[in-house]
Image (tube, helix red, strand yellow):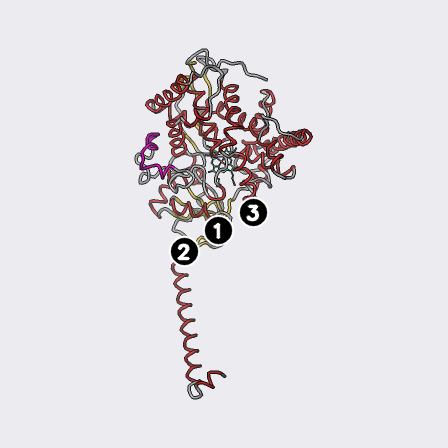
Amino acid sequence: EIMREIYPSTWPLTITTLFFIIFLAKFFLSKKKNVAQRTYKLPPGRRGWPLIGDSFNWYKAVASSHPPQFVEEQVKRFGKIFSCSLFGKWAVVSADPNFNKFVMQNEGKFFQSSYPKSFRDLVGKNGVITVQGEQQRKLHAIASNMMRLDKLRFHFLEDIQRVMLQTLSSFQSNQVIHLQDVCRKVAINLMVNQLLGVSSESEINEMARLFSDFVDGCLSVPINLPGMAYHTGMKAREKIIIKINNTIEMYRQRGSLEVNDGVLARLLEEENLPNDAVADFIINLLFAGNETTAKTMLFAVYFLSKCPRAMKQLLDEHENLRSKSNIVGEEMLTWQHYKSMSFTQCVIDETLRLGGIAIWLLREAKEDVVYQDYVIPKGCFVVPFLSAVHLDEKVYNGALNFNPWRWMDPDNQEKRNWRTSQFYAPFGGGARFCPGAELARLQIALFLHYFVTTYSWNQVKEDQMSFFPSARLVNGFQICLTRRHDDQMNIKSRD
Ligand code: HEM
């Protein structure tokens, strides 16, 4: 009407122009849509056999070769982001550091972690590992707070050393041990002691037995037949829950904190969580902090055994530290001692790079996600393959060699930052970044300190790494020990 008043003779023309503009807009929009449909596609890849797809190749490659041959082959054929079919679903696998970071940073938004039902049953539905969204962020913040650096210094440093002395002191010269089993025991004892506040050796041992069954269940192939690891694991879980609930009751009745109390007691004091959430929270930490730490300790000794120069430099660092500070027998190391272990930190970083325990992560796309020219359909698995970046020759010179000195190079300092680096992410990233990273590093450094200053060793049987069903050395790393000094660590274990 207004137009007609202003331009009485031109309004038909104006309306025609408007129709024309709308037509043009629709035409270009539909063109754009066609371009989108044409350009965005699933990353290239092969489809494998119906149903099983590439699952078999996946298992075979992950189990037997490091870096996994299957991933290397697909990267050569299709590029760093490729698709395949895993466990009956599409999967987008990535050896691309930028895309891996994108996936980790968008946890909860475009992607979410994904685990088989049997695993979720075992670790619990209320734990930080299995929950999503707000609940995950809340529990993750509590876990990070419980294992903050200043808490490590005051609550964990001495307890870790006590457990090390208890678990490692009793071996004699000429004794042959499977270091893999010893490291597992060390890690279980540490977790039971630090989370539940248990310090009596018999109680630790009882929990350690239950816990070992529980971890085997979590790491087993997800088949729920009676008598299989899953069922033994579920039984162990029930007993662990009873133990945790009794401990919760004990702390609630006592009402105040004591010096040697573990994470569980501090959690009850500082947070307001119902008992079943507390139990699942603790079980999640027990699981997440166990195999990872145990295998990093084991692999560090394995790599050091193959690299005498690094072994010597590490031993010198620890013996100098003891002799300069005049530390004898049971005397404990301080935080300053820990902070001065600079070569040890390089050994830990290199062990995590070369023998990374979490070599790949599993996510699921929450919606259709567009990344560069690709679209990742909703429901598709997404696998950031961390070790493919850690072992990429273009990122690390001599990537397959154990070279702790690489981390001293000033040019590598940015890459080395495991909280932010896209090239080095042994503790993951984004909202699921490992809250126990600092604790794990402290435990591993103290393990190396007590192990290398107390024993030398000869390897009895050849060994090699495998990553199926979880990271391990196939022969358990059998070594024959010799005590270095008879006075050191020769303490009696306490009950
Ligand atoms: C060398 C030892 C360790 C390594 C290599 C490691 C590695 C990782 C990685 C890669 C993730 C991310 C998983 C994902 O994104 O799906 C993770 C998560 C986690 N880690 Fe660790 N970890 C270690 C030790 C520990 C310890 C000692 C604890 C605690 C006692 C711990 C507790 C956790 C928890 C609770 C999560 C789940 C976080 C969440 O989902 O929000 N980890 N760890």
Amino acid of disc 2: Lys
- Crowding at label 1, few (<14), some or many (≥20) Cα neighbours within 10 Å? many
**Closer mark to the observer between disc 3 and disc 2:** 3
Is residue 410 one of those drawn in magenta?
Answer: yes
Q: Tell which of 2 and 494 is nearer to you.
A: 2
Relative to residue 8, is residue 446 depicted above or below? above
- Reading the image, the residue beneath label 3 is 134
Are the residues at dot 1 and dot 2 in contact (C-beta closer than 8 Å)? no
Relative to residue 416, is residue 482 depicted above or below? above
Q: Which residues are magenta?
A: 401-416
Q: Is residue 41 visible?
A: yes
- Reading the image, the residue beneath label 1 is 110
Residue 41 numbered tag: 2
Residue 336 coordinates in the image, percent (x, y): 44, 26
Q: Identify the residue at horizontal 56%, vertical 39% (top origin).
A: 142
Left or right of 79 in this view: 361: right
**Nearer the N terminus, badge 3 or badge 2?**
2
Amino acid of disc 1: Phe
Residue 476 coordinates in the image, percent (x, y): 45, 24
Query: Main structural element of the magenta stretch: helix, strand or loop?
Result: helix
Question: What is the secondary structure assignment of the residue under circle 1?
Answer: loop
Q: Is residue 227 visible?
A: no
Q: Identify the residue at horizontal 48%, vertical 25% (top origin).
A: 183
Question: What is the secondary structure assignment of the residue under circle 2?
Answer: loop
Residue 382 coordinates in the image, percent (x, y): 45, 47
